[in-house]
Structure formats: structure tokens, C-alpha cells
Image (tube, helix red, strand yellow):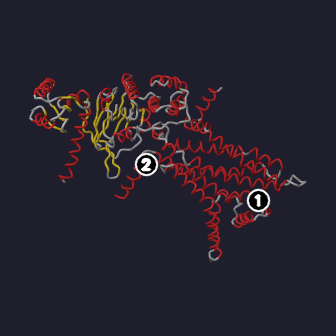
Amino acid sequence: MIRVENLSKRYGKMTAVHSLNFDVRKGTVFGFVGENGAGKTTTLSILSTLMLPTSGRAYINGMEVTTEPGLVRRQIGFLPDEFGVYDDLSVREYLAFYGTAYGVEPALIDKRAAELLHLVNLEDRSEVLVNSLSRGMKQRLGLARSLMHDPPVLILDEPASGLDPRSRIEMREIIKGLREQGKTVLISSHILPELADMCDEIGIIQRGTLVACASVEVVNARVSGKRHFLLEVMSEGHRLAELLSRKSKVTEILKVDENKVEFIFAGSEADQVELIHELAMGGFQLKTFQELGGSLEELFLRLTAEEDAKAELIPKMA
Amino acid sequence: MQELGNRWTGKWINPLLRKELRQRMRSGRTILALSLYLFVIGAVAFVYMYVNVQGQTLILQPARTAELFTFLSYLQLALVSFVTPGIASGVISGERERQTLSVLLTTPLSPITIIFTKFISSISFLLLLIIMTLPLYSIVFLFGGVLPSQVLAVFGLQVVTLGAIAGISIFFSTLLRRTGWSTVFSYATVAILFMGFAIFGYLFDSVGLHSADESVWMHLAGICYALDPIYMQAGIETNLGLLSPSFNQSIVSSVFDVVNSHSLSGKESWLFFLAVYILIGVILLLISAWRLRPGSLTMVRKRVIRWMAH
């Protein structure tokens, strides 16, 4: 449904996106993960026909975004990361305006608006002015707006950013519902555990390059081999670190102080139980034994750290 | 009834224009601006009439009525030229600042539709301002001395002038990211149209007086004056017999002298003014529509690089 081939975008000498390649299958949710400035918004802007790539091609439902932008616009619903609304319009008028702009039959507009307001839980707000809505409500209204012409593809740039936890959960449930309706969704976010919950596949972008692209199951399997733990003790943190460093399943000691040790553990759950038992028998007064971060976050941090290290090496080698 | 109205407007008016008109007429500022505009024009007309009629037995004085009409039409030209950049210089940059432009550009509405709709929406408000003053002008008809066709000719010139100013303002609004800067540049351009051309005309006239090629300098001065809405309105009013030195005011006399010495009351000047102003407006709107297209600058850059490589 969405195909990106060797897509690059340069601003002068700065490369924002470098030779991106990925596919999003019909009816799936693809999570696009990356730090600020990694190139997510640039990629989504190109796919939404708001920007031209420097090179490469991108297709939405078989249509090329640079040569057939008019047709592509009818195929997509786009929700930018930051967007405004027309304050002087009511919620219903706002949706009706976009419905008419997309050429929805006038007779169907009210019905469609009512259905979407029900979908995003705003049906009781249809007559209030848009400027009286909270940020979370405006975000949901934006999603309803992007669905007014019933597009097969949705491009959502950080739809949950700046929302409170309740609104995030609501947004997540709506997106899951859209997947069930057969929509193809490309969503970018920083909130990795949320993406894991609603995405079928994820792509991790770092400095404009896609460093990983796989199904969520594959990603989780890749990560489960190495986990990040925090151990808190009453005292003797340094002696604990020394003991851990001698263990074969402990691959790396990340941080040490008198009361805390952070380390990477490559063992199974049975190995983990054995380690805790050994530490307790060794006389350590354990306060906490905690696994840190979601699995996707782990992979993200590891991959982006590897890319950072490569980027640092390049000038040294040159 | 409202549904019938919605259906009619939905069929004949594009959705963006419908939204723009709805938003504009809903705003409290619009009502305030309309009221203030009418109040200023009305107050000036009544004060002028009161001062002139007071203590006189003969109320019907066609020359005085023509004077009042000329005075009102200049006041209207000044007010409309002042209001136009205020309305049009934020139409695109305002969308950008409110972060609504990116979403608008992902709709099937083409950039040319967006730009021309914004233009029509701005112009329709300005036309409303002009049409609203018609009852005040009817007072002028009441006392005689001015024909409706003369009023229409002067209004025609004003509509073309404000159309060009709206085009210039929308151009700056598309080109510049901030409404503040767009407004500054639009007002600066209006100042050039109204005062810059007059100053250049005066300078060319002065140089011509001491030059062997007086006719060349006079011709250049004539072009400058013919591009200045103040002088062109004077030219039309002279042609219609509304403006004459009998006004006995030095500023009117000097304008009248320029109009006569450069034949600004002729049809050629009027057509030249119309052609230039309409062309400027249309060209700037087309450039704005092109500039609104994603990647317009990238395309130019690529073409320049390709051209330089050849």
C-alpha cells in the first residue's frame, strides 16, 4: 500500500533522509520510530505530497507522490505533528469544510461527520466552537478530519504527542479500531511501548537512515536476548559490580555507585533466578532487582547508539 | 431555508470561499470595522454638508455637490487602500502561523484555487465596504451635480486599485513566513504606489525643465503619474467634469495642473492604468499560487543548476 524506494531528502549540505526503503502492507499499522530530527516528519511530509524528495520514489496505493500528487491526496488522510484548527467554526462545520474540500457528496457529509464524531468520542461536541476543545479533543478531531473522505491510507505524525495518558489510551484504541476497519496506517511516535502495542511492523530511523525494519515479534525476539537491569543494594555497590563482571551472562556493566549497579544480562529467566539467589547468599542486601525500559526502547537505544558510534568513527577514520 | 441556502452555496461556491466568508462575517472585528468605516465616511459627509449649507439660502449647488463627491471618493480611496493590506497580507502567512496550511495543502484544492479563493474572499469584504457607502453617496445624488455613471467610473478605478493591492499583499503573504513582515512590505508597496510614483513624476518633471530632452522626461513623468491611483482618480474626475480648478484649493489646483499637463484625463491613461494594475495583480497571484506548490523553489534550483551545467 505504501512503498518507499531509495528516498532521500537534502537541505543544502544537510541530509535529512538518506536512501530510505520500506513497504507498508495493506491493512497494517507501521510504526516509524526515531529521535527528534531523525527524519520522520520529512519522510511523512514527502509521502503526504507536502515536500519533494531530492531523489528516490514513494508510492501510495500504486501512485507516485511527486508525479500524481492530486490522486495521492485523495488516497491519504494526513495528521501533522503540529496542526491548527479554524477557531471560528463549530466542530461539525470544521468537518463539513474538509468533507466538501475532498469532494464528499453534500448529502453524505453530515452522516459521515456524525459517524466520525462518534468514533472519536466527540459526538456531544458537534455544535461547539473548535477553539473551546482541549488539546486531546482537537487531536481526535484532527483524526476525524483526516478520515472525512474515507481514505485507505492514514499518515499520522506523532498523534499522541502532548496528550495526557487518558487521551493517549483513547487515541491508541481509535487507531486499533481503524486497523480493524482495514485502514493502512503509518504512524510516527517517540512513545515506543505504545507503538509495540498497536503496530504490526516498526521501522527505526536514525540520522535519516533506516537502521531497522521488522515486525514487532521479530524485534521483540531480537531484544529478548539482552536485557537491561538495575540492582539497588543497601551498600557495597562496587563489590557487587565486581562480582557481576565475573559472571558470563552479564555482558556489560553500565553504571556503578555505592547503592546501584546497572548492567546488561544475556541469560534466561532461570539464569536470572539463579543470579538473585547467588547475590543473596553472597551477603548483599538487595533492595531492587528491576528490568529497565520496554523491549522496543531497548532495541531503539542500542541501534541508535551503534549508529552514533559509527558516525563518530567515520571522521576519525577519514 | 438554511439547508436550501447551504445547498445553493455548496453547489456554486467552493468550500474554502464558503468557509472564509463564514469566518469573516462571524468575527466581531468585521462588524466593528464595517461600523467604523461607515461612521468615518458618514461623519465627514455630514460635517462637510453642514459647513457648506449653513447660512445659505440656496441648498442646490451642483458645483459644491461635485466637490463633496470628490472629497468623499478620495477619502474612500485612502481608507480602502489602508484597509486592503490589513485584510489581505495575512491570508496565507496567517494559515501558516495557525498551522492550518499544511493540512489545507493535502486536500485536493489546488494552490491556484486556494490563492484565488483567498483573493476573492478579501475583495468581497472590500467590495462590501464600498457598496455599503452607496446610501451615503445617494445624498450626493439628492442635491444633483453628479451622475450615477460618474460614481460607477470612480468606483471602478477604486476596485481595480484595491484588487492590485490585494494581489500584492497576498503575494507577500505567500512569500514571507510572518504576517508582520508581509503587512510591512504590503504597506510599503502601497506607499510607493501612492507617493513614490508622484515623487518620481515630480522629479522627472523637474529634470525635464532643465534638460534638452524635455519630452522624454515629461513622458517618463506621465508614466509615473499614470500609475499613481491619486492622479488617475483625478484624471477620471476631470474627464467627468467633477474636478476643476474652481475648487480653489492649492493642492487640488496642483493635481489638476498635473492631470492637464500630462493628459491624464484621456482614455489612453485610463486604459494604461487598468492594464498595468490588472496585470500586476494577476501575475502576482499566479506567482503566489506557484510558490504555494510544494517544492517550487527546489524545482527552480534544479533548473538553474541544469542550465548552468549546460
Left or right: B132 with respect to B51? left
SS assignment at label 2: helix
Q: Residue at x 55, y 29 (%)?
A: A128
Amino acid carrying label 2: it is Ser
Residue, disc 1: B243
User: Residue B139 or A104: which is nearer the viewer?
Assistant: B139
Q: Residue at x 28, y 36 (%)?
A: A204
From the top left corner, tell me how far across and down residue B257 is, in percent.
Answer: 73, 66
Q: Give above or below for B61 relative to A142.
A: below
Confirm whether circles 2 and 1 share one chain.
Answer: yes
Q: Earlier in the sequence, mark 2 or mark 1?
A: 1
From the top left corner, tell me how far across and down residue A302 is, in percent.
Answer: 22, 37
Q: Quadrant of residue A179?
A: top left
The answer to whether residue B310 is visible is no
How crowded pointer 1 is (Cα within 10 Å; few <14, some 14-19, many 20+) is rated as: many
How crowded pointer 2 is (Cα within 10 Å; few <14, some 14-19, many 20+) is rated as: some
Q: How many marks?
A: 2
User: Residue A300 or B16: which is nearer the viewer?
Assistant: A300
SS assignment at label 1: loop
Residue, disc 2: B296
Say whether marks 2 and 1 touch (CB < 8 Å).
Answer: no
Amino acid carrying label 1: it is Leu
**Residue furthest to the right:** B57
From the top left corner, tell me how far across and down residue B298 is, in percent.
Answer: 39, 50
